[in-house]
Amino acid sequence: MSKRILIILCSIFFTPALIWFSAQVVSGSDDDHTERSGFLLPQKHSTNLTREQLRGKELYQYYCALCHGRTGKGDGFNSFNMSVPPADHTDATVMSTLSDAQIHQVIKEGGSSLGRSPMMPPWGRVISDSEINTLVAYIRTLVTSGK
């Protein structure tokens, strides 16, 4: 008998709450799929970067941003300590003079390998060739996006 009373009491209290909640969720407009009843639905992170470029961005933030800055403008934390400022990867004029192979070489062998600043260290013993390729792909996006 007590189970039956418990079921009746639960249905009396919880059924209206369920009806109210479902009415709140359903009443959202069809045009707005992002927010309903105060809850944000998960959204796919929108980006124009490829998988390779996203991996390059991660590497860039880890290895390059201290000198070149998070956005590639050459204004990183260490840039003020350098006698020769780091390259501005957002400058289309400068970046258009460099091929992907040259950028790869500078990252791998250092700035001196192309007659550039000796302040740019060689990363070839730390970063693999495939990772350098992802860095080059990401660096190329900085010119067009300015980000």
Image (tube, rainbow, N blue to C red):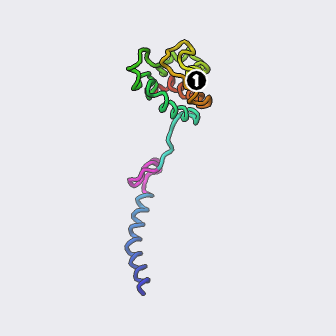
For label 1, the crowd category at 10 Å Cα-Cα, with few meaning under 14, some 14 to 19 and many 20 or more, is many
Please, what is the dominant secondary structure of the magenta stretch? loop
Q: Is residue 128 magenta?
A: no
Q: Which element is circle 1 on?
A: helix
Task: Name the residue located 50 percent from the left edge and 16 percent from the top edge.
Answer: 118
Q: Residue furthest bottom?
A: 1
Residue 19 position (above or below residue 51): below
Q: Position of residue 45 (x, y in %)?
A: 50, 41
Task: Name the residue located 39 percent from the left edge and 64 percent from the top edge.
Answer: 20
Q: Where is residue 29 in the image (x, y as percent from the top left)?
A: 44, 51
Q: In which quarter of the image is the N terminus?
A: bottom left
Q: How many marks?
A: 1
Looking at the image, residue 116 sits to the left or right of residue 82; the answer is right
Tell me if residue 66 can be seen. Answer: yes
Q: Position of residue 133 (x, y in %)?
A: 60, 28
Q: Where is residue 63 in the image (x, y as percent from the top left)?
A: 49, 30
Q: Is residue 37 magenta?
A: yes
Mark 1 is on which residue type? Lys
Residue 85 position (above or below residue 54): above
Task: Name the residue located 43 percent from the left edge and 79 percent from the top edge.
Answer: 7
Residue stretch in magenta: 26-41
| Residue bearing mark 1 | 108
Task: Name the residue located 53 percent from the left edge and 25 percent from the top edge.
Answer: 139
Front residue of 4/27: it is 4
Residue 23 position (above or below residue 64): below
Looking at the image, residue 49 sits to the left or right of residue 85; the answer is right
